């Protein structure tokens, strides 16, 4: 294994998803980095938004066994009248209670790790990557929010000959995005809404820098998949799809468009994190709606696929 440079930079990772078939070609490991500058109303990974560690609590699973209290080195869990011990302010966010909980009632989301710690975990599945044309994808959250860690991790993967992909929403300094171009084989670029007002309303952020970054990236990288979450009533109107298709068809680096049907897995997670899901009643689009959206992109000469 090649030595990892600058191995003391730490990243906040909230999930390592092995055997992923959704985040680029082949079998992949997806590294989810915590923290996102967008707050999409339909987010299916709400635990990715905060750039800090946090607990997900499922109180109904607690069996009042006390294992978490016994495991805590800080004495930071106290027993009140409820079965579930409560976290006090001296908590050091070490995760021992989460590891000790037998029912996953208490989960600490986000673990700090160096690239030197991450890389061996990624290399365990090299055989699967090699056999399937897969590799490693960095996602989030917004992975470019942890730019130094991301760049270090990409370079380490490259040094090992692994195929690298970055899944970004594009709201980041342009210089950071362009700096990782030489060590990124594939960009998965998420596009939410072309309409500026709708984008700001539903994601909490403007889209001008995002669109500029997509254009800048497509001038210097030739393997970009644009990923569009199809969210009924928000970005599936014909005018919105046409605008997205016109833009993506004009960009030399875009190889394909992936239409990602909205799904409801984020709703319960939001509840467990104590977030307000203001689109809680939103339902996934029909298969026909996805086919119709794909037809719009194909009519502009683009390859359009559902999922991925
Ligand atoms: S994260 Fe660590 S310090 Fe905090 S309550 Fe759990 S075991 Fe205690
Ligand atoms: S370890 Fe889990 S199940 Fe046991 S008391 Fe703590 S939170 Fe409840």
Image (cartoon, grey):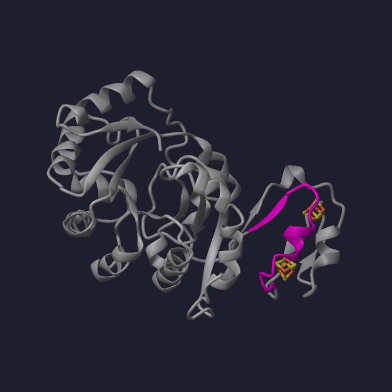
Q: Does 140 appear above or below 93?
A: above
What is the x, y in percent for residue 188? 34, 49
Q: From this viewpoint, is residue 21 visible?
A: yes
Residue 95 lies in the magenta stretch = yes
* Segment tinted magenta in the rendering: 91-108
Residue 298 lies in the magenta stretch = no
Q: Quadrant of ligand 1?
A: bottom right
Q: Nearer the viewer, residue 7 or 100?
A: 7
Give the quarter of the image for residue 108: bottom right
Residue located at (52% from left, 44% from top): 131
Q: From this viewpoint, is residue 230 visible?
A: no
What is the x, y in percent for residue 48? 49, 55
Residue located at (33% from left, 37% from top): 258
What is the x, y in percent for residue 109? 60, 58
Count of marks, rendered view: 0
Horizontal side of residue 71 vs 194, given as left or right:
right
Give the quarter of the image for residue 87: bottom right
Quadrant into which the C terminus falls? top left
Horizontal side of residue 291 vs 75, given as left or right:
left
Give the quarter of the image for residue 235: top left
Horizontal side of residue 213 vs 53, given as left or right:
left
Q: Nearer the viewer, residue 205 or 218?
A: 218
Q: Nearer the viewer, residue 67 or 250?
A: 250
Horizontal side of residue 8 vs 169, given as left or right:
right
Q: Does 49 appear above or below 288?
A: below
Q: Nearer the viewer, residue 220 or 52?
A: 220
What is the x, y in percent for residue 168? 35, 55
- In the displayed orientation, state which residue is furthest to the top: 288
Residue located at (38% from left, 21% from top): 286
Quadrant into which the N terminus falls? bottom right
């Amino acid at each position: 294994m090649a030595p990892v440079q600058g191995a003391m930079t730490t990243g906040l990772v909230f999930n390592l998803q092995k055997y992923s078939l959704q985040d680029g070609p082949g079998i992949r490991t997806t590294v989810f980095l915590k923290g996102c500058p967008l707050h999409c109303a339909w987010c299916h990974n709400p635990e990715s938004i905060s750039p800090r560690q946090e607990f997900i609590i499922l109180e109904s699973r607690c069996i009042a066994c006390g294992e978490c209290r016994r495991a805590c080195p800080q004495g930071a869990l106290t027993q009140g009248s409820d079965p579930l011990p409560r976290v006090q302010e001296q908590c050091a966010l070490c995760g021992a209670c989460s590891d000790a909980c037998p029912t996953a009632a208490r989960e600490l989301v986000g673990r700090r790790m160096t690239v030197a710690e991450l890389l061996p975990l990624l290399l365990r599945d090299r055989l699967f990557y090699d056999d399937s044309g897969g590799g490693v994808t960095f996602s989030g959250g917004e992975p470019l929010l942890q730019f130094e860690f991301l760049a270090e991790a990409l370079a380490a993967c490259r040094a090992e000959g692994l195929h690298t992909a970055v899944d970004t929403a594009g709201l980041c300094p342009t210089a950071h995005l362009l700096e990782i171009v030489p060590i990124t084989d594939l960009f998965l670029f998420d596009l939410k809404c072309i309409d500026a007002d709708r984008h700001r309303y539903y994601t909490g952020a403007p889209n001008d820098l995002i669109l500029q970054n997509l254009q800048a990236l497509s001038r210097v990288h030739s393997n970009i998949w644009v990923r569009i979450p199809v969210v009924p009533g928000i970005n599936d109107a014909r005018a919105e799809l046409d605008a997205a298709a016109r833009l993506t068809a004009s960009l030399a680096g875009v190889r394909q468009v992936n239409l990602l049907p909205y799904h409801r897995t984020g709703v319960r997670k939001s509840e467990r994190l104590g977030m307000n899901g203001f689109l809680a009643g939103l339902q996934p689009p029909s298969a026909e709606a996805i086919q119709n959206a794909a037809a719009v992109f194909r009519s502009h000469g683009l390859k359009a696929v559902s999922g991925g």
